[in-house]
Image: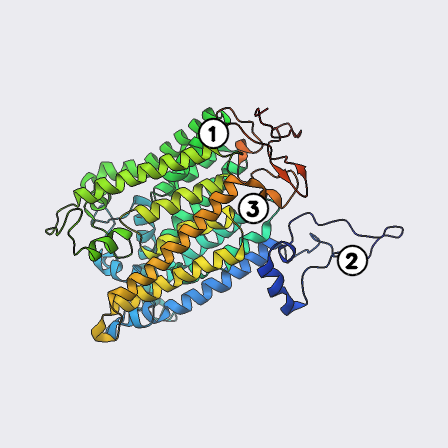
Amino acid sequence: MLVPRGTSDPPGPDRVIPSWADPVVAQASEAVGGPWGRHAVTGRARFWTPLRVCLLFATVVLAVAWAKQAPCSAGDWSGSRQYTHFCYSDAVPLFGGYGLGDGALPYLDTRVEYPVLTGAVMALAAAGARLYASAAEAVGLLPDVPLVQGFTALTALLLSVCALVTVRGVLGLAGRRPWDAAMVGLSPVLLVHAFTNWDLLAVAFATLGMLAWARNRPVLAGVLLGIGIAAKFYPLLLLGVLFVLCLRAGRLATWATTTAAAGVAWAAVNLPVAAAAPDEWAWFFVFSRERQANPESIWNMALHATDSRILDGPLAAGQPPSVLNAVVTGCLLALAAGVAWLALAAPVRPRVAQLAFLLVAGFLLLNKVWSPQFSLWLLPLAVLARPRWRSLLLWQVTEVLVWGVTMLHYLGTDNRGIEVQWFFFGVLLRDVAVVVLMALVVRDVLRPDGDVVRAGWPGVDDPAGGPLDHARDRLTLRRRATISSPDRGASSLGADRGGGRREVREDGR
């Protein structure tokens, strides 16, 4: 860009430059000429905007993810192909198990252990696959593919849209850090688990709900979160995060509006199915209660280490793990109390994404079920909570490792798989990585000037905060101390909603 006559420098950047702020990006940029120049101008690209580039990144990763799934998509799993090729997907066995190829409707004709919206997406993809098969037979010009392959392809297409929506949502939530969305688009977790199950559906709605909240649209935020809860229950945790943050800021009326809208949206999706098939609709809750600890959970490792001498001990078929359920419930309540204490006792109100990541990550660690694809729940929250490439990549490497050892463990030692000890070792590494990431986020909460989001741009409080952004405290559990920054002097993290700045003082004023 030409600099106007009489000026020495172009205007400064209007956003955080990744190659200036992150050492991993700075080092990677050497392959294309080095970090962004000090005199370069940002925001002038007409086509290759951060959004389009991040969406392109995600599209490439999703294409590779589909290529990874291709050996399994036709349903030929002979020779344990789903494990040897690391291409397992729940869509293939459930297509036949639920009778979707024969036109069975989830809940109405078959029992499904998923929330209603997930079942609806299954039915939609199955209907599309049957429609394509009929058209191919009638026209004779279209390629003839097995029904299950058409189902998996349409499912992957729908989930790809959800992934792109998630990238768009994260970019909108990142504020002055739009390139943070590339951490989602280029994610190893997205590459491995995009099509393992239908989790991206809930992730997309949860991210859009957070974006609506960030844009001060509490009713829309509630509707989107309610729809997300109808796909997977984890977005319900986000309402808990908003509650405790609104409690600190004195914005409970706004939270109540969002929660009421979420309840109405969830009921609108669920009540018709519950009325038409109450027993089948309730099966998700019954299945969740009766389900035992899954292989990747800490509880399964504890049971294996003690030869099932703890908790419920050996269970008969269909017997619910009552003791395990009680212990897990107690642990989750303690987790919620700890996160609430942190939210109210931190020197500066934590950002929404920080608290959401801590609660969801703790939930996964302590819950009796942590299916590998559940880690997609953490992806946008981790990126928004602590947008640092090194720590996020190290964590995601362990997630890829868990998927690899899971497939090799299920393959069985007779088929050149691995022993259970190596499987547990991989899971334990992942758990440690998540705990370390949680500890880093807690440190940022307790020392806000080390938070790269707040410290990376003057005057930034919480880009995802919406009604909470720059809101004054109304309820805290301790006095707030002055927070200083070597670059900004007294912190502006406590600036009021009117745009004025105020120092964070000992008396909290």
Up-down: is 264 above or below 20?
Answer: above
Q: Position of residue 109 (x, y in %)?
A: 20, 49
The label shown at residue 269 is none
Give the residue at x 42% y 44%: 358
Q: Is residue 190 visible?
A: no
Q: Does dot 1 land on a helix, a strand or a loop?
A: helix
Q: Find disc 3 in the rendering and name its residue.
A: 174
Mark 1, Cα crowd under 10 Å, few <14 / some 14-19 / many 20+, is: many
Q: From the viewer's perspective, is residue 219 above or below residue 89? A: above
**Residue found at x 29% / y 46%:** 367
Query: Which label number is shown at residue 1?
Result: 2
The structure's colour scheme is rainbow
Residue 138 x %, y %: 33, 66
What percent of the width, then of the height, locates residue 339? 41, 37
Three-letter amino acid code of the residue under disc 1 = Cys
Residue nearest the viewer, comparing 2 with 156: 2
Mark 1, residue position = 246
Quarter of the image with the C terminus is top right
Visible residue check, residue 423: yes
The reply to whether callout 3 and callout 1 are in contact (CB within 8 Å) is: no
Spatial separation of the CA atoms under disc 3 and disc 2: 27 Å
Secondary element under disc 2, as helix, strand or loop, is loop
